[in-house]
Image (cartoon, coloured by chain):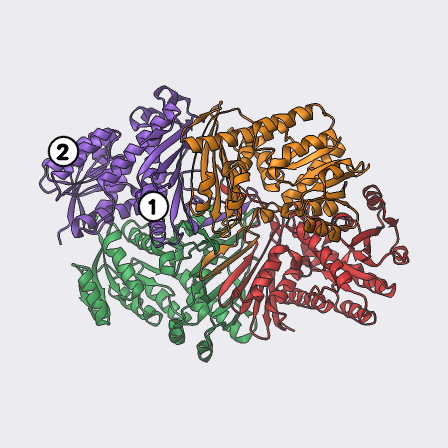
Chain colours: A red, B green, C purple, D orange
Amino acid sequence: MNPVRVGIVGLGRLGRRHAENLAWHVPGAKLVAACSPVSEEREWARAKFAEPSIHQDYDALLADPSVDAVWLVTPTSLHASQIIAALRAGKHVFCEKPLSLDLAECDAVIEAHARHPHLHVMIGFVRRFDASYRDAFDSVTKGAIGRPFMVRSQTCDKNDPDGFFVRFAPTSGGLFLDCSVHDIDLARWLLGNPKPKRVYASGTIAIHEGLRECNDIDNGVGTIEFEDGRLAVLYASRTMAHGHDTQTEVIGTAGVLSVGRNPRANRVEIADAHGMRNACTPTFFERFEDAFLREAQAFVALLRDGMPTGLTLADAREATRIGIAMRQAYESGRAVEL
Amino acid sequence: MNPVRVGIVGLGRLGRRHAENLAWHVPGAKLVAACSPVSEEREWARAKFAEPSIHQDYDALLADPSVDAVWLVTPTSLHASQIIAALRAGKHVFCEKPLSLDLAECDAVIEAHARHPHLHVMIGFVRRFDASYRDAFDSVTKGAIGRPFMVRSQTCDKNDPDGFFVRFAPTSGGLFLDCSVHDIDLARWLLGNPKPKRVYASGTIAIHEGLRECNDIDNGVGTIEFEDGRLAVLYASRTMAHGHDTQTEVIGTAGVLSVGRNPRANRVEIADAHGMRNACTPTFFERFEDAFLREAQAFVALLRDGMPTGLTLADAREATRIGIAMRQAYESGRAVEL
Amino acid sequence: MNPVRVGIVGLGRLGRRHAENLAWHVPGAKLVAACSPVSEEREWARAKFAEPSIHQDYDALLADPSVDAVWLVTPTSLHASQIIAALRAGKHVFCEKPLSLDLAECDAVIEAHARHPHLHVMIGFVRRFDASYRDAFDSVTKGAIGRPFMVRSQTCDKNDPDGFFVRFAPTSGGLFLDCSVHDIDLARWLLGNPKPKRVYASGTIAIHEGLRECNDIDNGVGTIEFEDGRLAVLYASRTMAHGHDTQTEVIGTAGVLSVGRNPRANRVEIADAHGMRNACTPTFFERFEDAFLREAQAFVALLRDGMPTGLTLADAREATRIGIAMRQAYESGRAVEL
Amino acid sequence: MNPVRVGIVGLGRLGRRHAENLAWHVPGAKLVAACSPVSEEREWARAKFAEPSIHQDYDALLADPSVDAVWLVTPTSLHASQIIAALRAGKHVFCEKPLSLDLAECDAVIEAHARHPHLHVMIGFVRRFDASYRDAFDSVTKGAIGRPFMVRSQTCDKNDPDGFFVRFAPTSGGLFLDCSVHDIDLARWLLGNPKPKRVYASGTIAIHEGLRECNDIDNGVGTIEFEDGRLAVLYASRTMAHGHDTQTEVIGTAGVLSVGRNPRANRVEIADAHGMRNACTPTFFERFEDAFLREAQAFVALLRDGMPTGLTLADAREATRIGIAMRQAYESGRAVEL
């Protein structure tokens, strides 16, 4: 069976991780092209990989007939148009989350995909591919906690005193669309895709006053009520002192299953004058390092063997829709009906 | 120094615990009277304690001049009138939480107390006297986590398949006033008593359909927004499979402090075919056994030495006020302004 | 039923704890006398307790007919002679562990007790009365881990930079007889009192060089082989940085049960720049605070109701015998046959 | 730079894992040959890998000039002769632990290596390459726990009711040489390679009576005393109910560092009628999956870049020497001087 020939687009920190995975760790994949408008990033790719052709321009990569699939690790504002262009060029698409900050764009992608049903498009909700989340999903599905009726989930990043994300805020879509979108997707997945009915959200600025001018926050909480009575309670933060702390609980009629209650870095513990303690995962990179690899393997398995990932464009659109409603609820101080 | 002579009122399960503490474990206190309308409960007291005079009637107990303080472990609907009567009779009062389900009643108690300023009234928000919560409060106050800006807190009871609380539901005030009232008080205490601005709440019936007729729920979540931007996120449940699970997190600009993340029963762990595990506290009795004792000691210290507890009737009224707003938010599906 | 009238002997730090328990927290006990050769300690007792008669001299206390039982919290070197004197005076005896550092003395006590079979003598192996150890014992007895065949147990104290115990070393009996004696007793208890066959031990001085002159160590390990093939592995230390860390594991054919794997001070955890952590119990006082109380309650229940504690003088002698063998093994570098 | 061309020898369960790592996950390595006397294993390799040449016979593989390095995952009894043959054929060697059960064989390998100093030989003490152990080593080396003076370490396998290892016992070298050899190596590594002075060991058969005829045990403990006073306490078991449980503690003058106190399978926890629990790693495969990969990467980095692993043949010999002494101590009931 021929390998899937992949062209990666975007070689920032996360893009490089994906590129390395595709080049060396995904049996059945071949990294044949890389594209970035940044010359340093292209230099990195040239030095790191012998084989791929390097492009400055996305259209040039799309014109390359040796590319079967594009792998988009680009700014969110480009996602929709880049996906549509790739479909028109006959390429499969992997694209980092979120699909888009705009519902109309989500719909345009879904329509474009409907015109190319033989091509696969996958949005990278990476947590679904983490071994622990996968185990949780399987256990819940098998009935380990009875009927699951509530999810509590958080995405909390370590505080960056330099406030990189403050500069990023005007285009990030805000805390809920940038961070909680993961938890929205997890909640829907773990609860069996119930239909959302109403959303409420609140937020505050704990540290980064610079967010105020674009009406963003550094800590936010929200509730999703689903039509069948199920609930999700979400929390997102940019200001943790201890590290990246992603946690999820699924509460069922016969038990509570949790993922990541202690964001331990590894299996080391130390007992000393500070008490008994463990280091924490500093960023989502360390926490989801394996999941990024499994995600790539899943995409390749989808293309080669038709192995379904259970992740659709409709899921990605729904995550954006709920994220937008959370932002509206926060801004208005009112519950938003969906 | 003379001991504080206490008359206990109400000898149900919790009342008996209080009675035993007062009789044997609180230096400076003396259990001199007990009162219950239930003959079995009076029998229990007669068999257990040599000294106290036993009353069927509350007024008889109030007429007893040897009683310095009454200790009310009675149905919530009686709290306000019993406190007011005790004050009129010149007795100090300890009363189980909540003060009342009704704001006008709370105000009546506060007014009555204002007319008897030399008498002490304390509402038993027992968690404030738990050693771990006390340690958490002290650490937060000392700045261990920077500026605290958010509390997440839950009161989750083990599921009672017999559904005792369903029969209790018509008079309990509902899930938020019965359970979350603890978390409301904790959040206010740990955040330094900020002024609430807006409340939202949601809920569901996971197991006990019998609650539907009195419009109650067995799982509920809520958000409190305070005027200074601080937040509280609460969860209450009647349906846990593993035990009584009370947890609280205080999130600050320099750390997250938690109490009770694992509701472990004791220091035993077992590794076997079920994995690595620990038993959980079955009910709030086991979890707060020591706290009930410390609470009694604190009340006696207040009466004998004027040692303040930091717990006022205004705190108790505020907990009721916010709890009522949570119920309204749940019932209306709308955020409630305070 | 009349209360047990107790006279406490020795009012150092631990003696005071016992005295307070007996005075206020043990229903059925009455602290009627206290004895110490140290005037400050007698002053403390006079200020603290209204009732007890205060003695400077042990014989005076024994002569007091109102004393039913003596409670010895005195130097180990006095234990045997004080117990024997108490028995001759017709008093029941509670005595802190160890019974003696000398086997002949142990035998003399056992013989004296045989001449006064109506009197009770209990040596305070306090861990048997800790709620977690009690739960462990019950679980093991019920077969929760199949057949238990090995115990690993440690007694590790927080390092005292002042090295108080170095000055205490010449009379303590050394690390194994002072600390491991607890673990020896636990191992025997949890394994059902198997007969020891052979002992080996090793040790080192990690910090306190002053121990060298009395041939003591600040860290020691040992193995006990029992005749039926069961094993115990013990560790004792004076040099922990994080606190008092007492742990015990029982290993069985169907599971491993542990007590105290994390010597957590309470239910508080904090996540901050140091990672995720909890404070530890600073000394055995905090760790075994409740156990000292339960121990006193058990002794009173023994005297009043004949409720057996399962703890005999033969157990205390065996702990001393094995402790001596461990010291010999350490000193000789050879396994010691028992 | 040219890739390291590897020929794998032995394709049992662990051999296959190594083969997959070398084929797909080790940049800079190329799996060019595979060798097994078992036809099913050769079939597996043919089906799995397109490129490698497949050999039935070790000599044939050694004769292949395209092989730079051999990777031995063969029975321990073959290790020494196969390593020596590979060196003579001019190949680098990776070999699974232990080097040999026989000290004379260890010496013969060391001598052979001395005659081929340009070739690298690495014995696979895989735990040194585990991320958590590596973190522990780095922390200890940096002084995080002061001066380390004691290691406690265990290798405990999940019980196999079929008793595969009982059939393997006659050639395994026994529990200490098969399992504790890992802990011996860890203890030496973490303590900075102190010189051993004396060893003691004990053991028992908890479940597998079939071991008795070859004088082996299924649970064993031992102590290593080093010349500078440092200590190691080891435990090995074949009979755990909960899974593979490898733990190590390093005890220092300023703290205790542990690896793997809870052998958690992943980040999932469940709270239900069994309490609060997590699944455990079933076998060493799951526990050390990543470490096997890092080990292979380290060997390749050694060959390509001369990056030292810190692991010498002298280390492997010392582990065997101490393991043999532990077995002698167990068999004789006496401490063995080294």
| Residue name at image x 38 percent, y 47 percent | C148
> Which SS class for mark 2?
helix
Task: Pinpoint residue A181: horizontal percent, then vertical percent.
Answer: 67, 61
Q: Amino acid at mark 1?
A: Leu
Question: Does the image show residue D307?
Answer: no
Give the number of the disc on residue C190. Answer: 1
Q: Disc 2 is attached to a residue of which chain?
A: C
Is C131 left, or right, of D162 in this rendering? Answer: left
Up-down: is A304 above or below C46?
below
Q: Is residue B254 visible?
A: yes
* B181, C177: nearer the viewer: C177
Residue on which disc 2 sits: C85
Give coordinates of residue B21: x percent, y percent. Answer: 27, 56
| Mark 2 Cα-neighbour bin, 10 Å: few <14, some 14–19, many ≥20 | some
Q: Nearer the viewer, residue D69 or D296?
A: D69
Crowd tier of the residue under label 1, counting other residues whose Cα lies within 10 Å: few below 14, some 14–19, many 20 or above: many
The subunit carrying tag 1 is: C
Q: How many marks?
A: 2
Q: Nearer the viewer, residue A92 or C332?
A: C332
- Label ID, residue B312: none
- N-term-proximal mark, 1 vs 2: 2
